[in-house]
Image: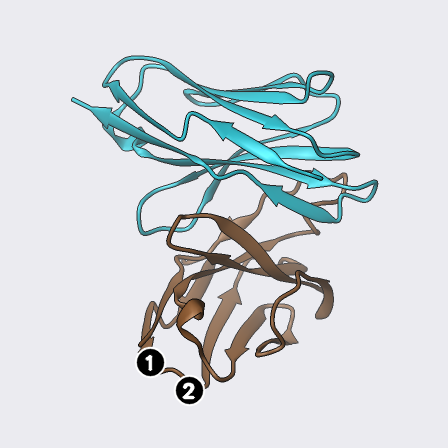
């Protein structure tokens, strides 16, 4: 069984379009995350949700809007896509927020490669 | 400014050899430090997690060390295998509640037969 799954795996779209990426975890975790990995392979955290509440928003343009309908899902909606949004987006989950003193293991999804033309 | 720097940027080693990757950080206050392995085209996988009081932690052939005084960590790979070819990322949690993550740029390891 896949622990953290994302759909789609690949997404190619035109500038200006709106798109969504879905993430689901079946680990029973309370915390989920979205990361962006650029062409230089640098990972940056974008958002983190704990028990469906936003706890981290790392200066991401407001064209990006996460939505957490329940603890097992954290979707990422992107409006008015720009060329610079091209990257691989990773979803992840952990029992508790990884930054706290508790050393919870973080599990990543397989990634969604977004290409904006 | 909170920073995490990894060295070397890339590394080529022969199968069966050992290697050590470095991670230096300037973050304060420190909460915990993680090492991840990321295979090409896949999501990162957690290798080790160390809190302030831990000096060393092993996961199979991977051994991480932490010196909180000098703010340095290393990841040692013993008897490398072809499957160890990947990027290795060091991540430090910052803040009294550790509510910020600072990522290193990663070290790309290529193991050759």
Mark 1 surroundings: few (<14), some (14-19) or many (≥20) residues within 10 A: some
- Up the image or down, A85 lies above or below B109; here it is below
Q: Secondary structure at mark 1?
A: strand
Chain that the image shows in brown: A
Q: Residue furthest left?
A: B113
Mark 2 surroundings: few (<14), some (14-19) or many (≥20) residues within 10 A: few
The spot of residue A8 in percent (x, y) is 36, 72
Q: Are marks 2 and 1 in contact (CB under 8 Å)?
A: yes
Instruction: Indicate left or right for B37 with B55 as reference.
Output: left
The spot of residue B108 in percent (x, y) is 36, 33
**In this orientation, which residue lies closer to the viewer: A72 or A110?**
A110
Name the residue rendered at 70%, 70% in the picture: A52
Q: Which residue is mark 2?
A: A17
The quadrant in which residue B33 appears is: top right
Instruction: Indicate left or right for B79 with A89 as reference.
Output: left
The spot of residue B18 in percent (x, y) is 35, 13
Chain letter of mark 2 equals A
Q: Which residue is mark 1?
A: A13
- Up the image or down, A114 lies above or below A105; here it is below
Chain that the image shows in cyan: B
Instruction: Indicate left or right for B5 with A59 as reference.
Output: left
The quadrant in which residue B85 appears is: top left
Q: Secondary structure at mark 2?
A: loop
Position of the C terminus of chain A, as image quadrant, is: bottom left
**In this orientation, which residue lies closer to the viewer: A94 or B20?**
B20
- Same subunit, labels 2 and 1: the answer reads yes
Chain letter of mark 1 equals A
The quadrant in which residue A99 appears is: top right
Name the residue rendered at 54%, 74% in the picture: A75
């Amino acid at each position: 069984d896949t622990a953290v799954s994302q759909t789609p795996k690949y997404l190619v779209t035109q500038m200006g379009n709106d798109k969504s990426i879905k993430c689901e975890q079946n680990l029973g975790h309370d915390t989920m995350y979205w990361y962006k990995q650029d062409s230089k392979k640098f990972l940056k955290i974008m958002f983190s949700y704990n028990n469906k509440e936003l706890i981290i928003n790392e200066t991401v343009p407001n064209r990006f809007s996460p939505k957490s309908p329940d603890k097992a899902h954290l979707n990422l909606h992107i409006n008015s896509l720009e060329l610079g949004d091209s990257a691989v987006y990773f979803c992840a989950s952990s029992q508790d927020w990884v930054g706290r003193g508790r050393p919870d293991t973080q599990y990543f999804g397989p990634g969604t490669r977004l290409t904006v033309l | 400014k909170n920073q995490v720097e990894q060295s070397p940027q890339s590394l080529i080693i022969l199968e069966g050899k050992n290697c050590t990757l470095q991670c230096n950080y300037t973050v304060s206050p420190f909460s915990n430090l993680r090492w991840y392995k990321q295979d090409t085209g896949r999501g990162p996988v957690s290798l080790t997690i160390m809190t302030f009081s831990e000096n060393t932690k092993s996961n199979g052939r991977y051994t991480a060390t932490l010196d909180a005084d000098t703010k340095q960590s290393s990841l040692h790979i013993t008897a490398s295998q072809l499957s160890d070819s990947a990027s290795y990322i060091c991540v430090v949690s910052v803040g009294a509640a550790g509510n910020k993550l600072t990522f290193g740029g990663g070290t790309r390891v290529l193991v050759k037969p």
